[in-house]
């Protein structure tokens, strides 16, 4: 699903290429190939996620074994920050992600990106890409299973769906 801020349209295709178009003309302004530029792998089910827009950035979590999060300048495509979950403690399993969830509090003073990798749910600062260490235990929550979706935010709750069985749907404040 594409994302737009009214000036730009961002669309991540099934082969992990982010296309950025002028919303008024449809002209492609720049593109970023995550396979070529970041070594992302195309899974057998291809790539499927929504880019997120946060201030002057477009943020994407390319699906694949490299499972990183990348923030790019909306106007130019230049890298602002990256996050590599290999630098964090995670559990067993494949290093895949189900995308990103964005939350900000009612006053707009606090913002977070949530993503899950190898059974751990992480909170990232959307400005810097740094793990928010006061979330969960040192920046993550051990879910003890994978996720079927990246989750959804309802007010101050992050609701996530797991692989199944007891505790498959959970909410975090």
Image (cartoon, grey):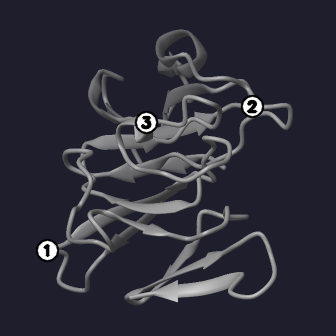
Dot label at residue 86: 3
The residue sitting at 73% across, 25% down in the picture is 42
> Dot 3: within a 10 Å radius of its alpha carbon, few (fewer than 14), some, or many (20 or more) residues?
few
Residue 14 makes an appearance in the image: yes
Q: Which residue is mark 1?
A: 109
Q: Position of residue 136 (x, y in %)?
A: 33, 74
In the depicted view, which residue is nearer to us: 105 or 24? 105
Check disc 2: other Cα within 10 Å, few if <14, some if 14-19, many if 20+: some
| Alpha carbon distance from label 3 to label 2 | 24 Å
Question: In the image, residue 129 lies at what x, y percent?
Answer: 27, 45
Mark nearer the N terminus (1 vs 3): 3
Q: Position of residue 170 (x, y in %)?
A: 59, 86
Label 3 element class: helix
**Residue 51 point in image, percent of width and height:** 52, 45
Is residue 5 at least partly visible in the picture? no
At label 1, counting other C-alpha atoms closer than 10 Å, the crowd grade (few under 14, some 14-19, many 20 or more) is few
């Amino acid at each position: 699903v594409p994302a737009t801020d009214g000036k730009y349209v961002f669309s991540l295709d099934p082969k992990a290429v982010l296309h950025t178009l002028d919303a008024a003309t449809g002209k492609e302004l720049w593109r970023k190939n995550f396979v070529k530029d970041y070594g992302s792998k195309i899974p057998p089910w291809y790539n499927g996620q929504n880019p997120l827009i946060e201030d002057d950035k477009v943020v994407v979590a390319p699906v694949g074994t490299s499972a990183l999060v990348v923030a790019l300048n909306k106007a130019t495509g230049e890298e602002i920050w990256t996050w590599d979950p290999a630098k964090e403690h995670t559990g067993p399993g494949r290093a895949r992600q189900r995308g990103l969830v964005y939350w900000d509090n009612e006053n707009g003073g606090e913002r977070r990106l949530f993503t899950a990798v190898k059974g751990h749910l992480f909170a990232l600062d959307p400005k810097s890409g740094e793990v928010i260490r006061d979330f969960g235990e040192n920046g993550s929550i051990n879910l003890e299973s994978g996720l079927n979706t990246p989750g959804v935010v309802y007010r101050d709750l992050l609701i996530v769906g797991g692989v199944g069985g007891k505790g498959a749907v959970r909410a975090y404040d």
